[in-house]
Image (spheres, rainbow, N blue to C red):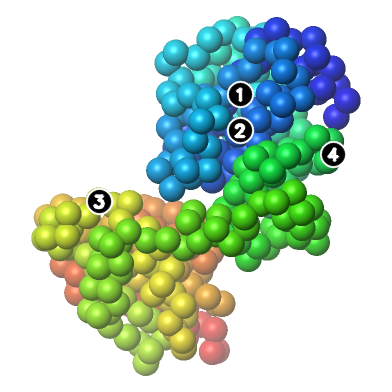
Amino acid sequence: MKEIWEKVEAAHQIGICGHVRPDGDCVGTCMALYLYVKKNYPQKAVNVHLEYMPERFAYLFDGTGYQEGFENMPECDLFFSLDTGDLERLGAAAKIVEKADTCICIDHHISNTGFADINVVDPDSSSASQVLFELLDEKKIDKSIATALYLGIVQDSGCFQYDSTSRRTMEIAGILMEKGVNTSNIVDRTMKQKTYVQNQMLGRVLLESLLLLDGQVIASRITQGMMEFYGATKEDLEGIVEQLRVTQGTEVAIFLHEVGVLEYKVSMRSKEYVDVSKIASHFGGGGHVRAAGCTMSGTYHDILNTLLEWIDLQIKDRSK
Ligand SMILES: [Mn+2]
């Protein structure tokens, strides 16, 4: 921990990056470290580059001086790689790492390859933001730094819902809250808020959903025609399968998104006993036990019938 701040003291040009397709934890960790170094080491040249700033997080960081894109990133002697398990995930920023004297990695991915000179990786941590918090001097954290850390923690812990949430995660959240973070606003605007189009798509999917296998499965779909009608992009479909999943009494939720002629992207979620990753991998996809996906060909009803057979087998196996 001390070593990291000695490196910062000795550095002239400090660069901070996270992984490509940045999520809330990536943005939060990068921005927190950037604001912390700027505030507490004002004589140092530091910049943070994100591949891009996702729109729903941008309002939190107006005027802080972050840069979008890796192309015009200057060379630096000290490079921080945050929330990133391997060099490949740094995208175009990887070439800056090669030229830096020291690379420090702060991460929580169990798959982390240990590619940096100094690796601070805690796979039991809810988020990279939590790992970073443990390296900072609590007294030197102001409201803007706390806000960035809080964003990372709520986003990667599913708002304190996933198994990675520990007593310590909650304690840190409390400390950040006392720094003045507007916690309810962050959850509202970065997690719950939907655009009008997103709500329309969600409504349509719920209206047309089917309960199958005696109510143990709920399924629905979006066609290319519907996407065009609402002017929707695939980002507008985020969260739909989760809404299907919370339907009372169901074990599995299936959501099909038509991506070509007789071709669907399949998303599946389960609650307690069906292993959807087993089914998805059979069809060339993958994922986790409770959340998985694949691409399948056929009509909506043919694909559903095929998936139902697989699900039914698992349900029957269980009752044996
Ligand atoms: Mn993360």
Which numbered disc flags the more N-terminal residue, 2 or 3? 2
Distance from label 3 to label 1 (Cα)?
Answer: 31 Å
Q: Is there a contact, CB below 8 Å, between mark 2 and mark 4?
A: no
Task: Please give left or right for residue 101 compared with residue 243 in the image.
Answer: right
Distance from label 4 to label 1 (Cα)?
Answer: 22 Å
User: Disc 3 vs disc 4: which is toward the camera?
Assistant: 4
Residue drawn at x 32%, y 59% is 195
Q: Would you place residue 47 above or below residue 138 in this image?
A: above
Q: Secondary structure at mark 4?
A: helix
Badge number at residue 139: 4
Q: Is mark 3 within 8 Å of ligand 1?
A: no
Which residue type does callout 1 highlight? Ile
Q: Is mark 4 within 8 Å of ligand 1?
A: no
Image position, residue 143 (x, y; %): 69, 43
For disc 1, the marked residue is: 16
Residue drawn at x 70%, y 7% is 12
Q: Would you place residue 318 above or below residue 41 in this image?
A: below
Quadrant housing residue 28: top right
Label 1 neighbour load within 10 Å: few <14, some 14-19, many 20+: many
Image position, residue 172 (x, y; %): 77, 53
For disc 2, the marked residue is: 30
Q: Is there a contact, CB below 8 Å, between mark 3 and mark 4?
A: no
Residue drawn at x 75%, y 19% is 41
Which numbered disc flags the more N-terminal residue, 4 or 1? 1
Which residue type does callout 3 highlight? Thr
Q: Is there a contact, CB below 8 Å, between mark 2 and mark 3?
A: no
Which residue type does callout 4 highlight? Lys
Image position, residue 218 (x, y; %): 35, 80
Distance from label 2 to label 4 (Cα)?
Answer: 19 Å
Q: Is there a contact, CB below 8 Å, between mark 2 and mark 1?
A: yes
Badge number at residue 233: 3
Q: Would you place residue 191 above or below residue 205 in this image?
A: above
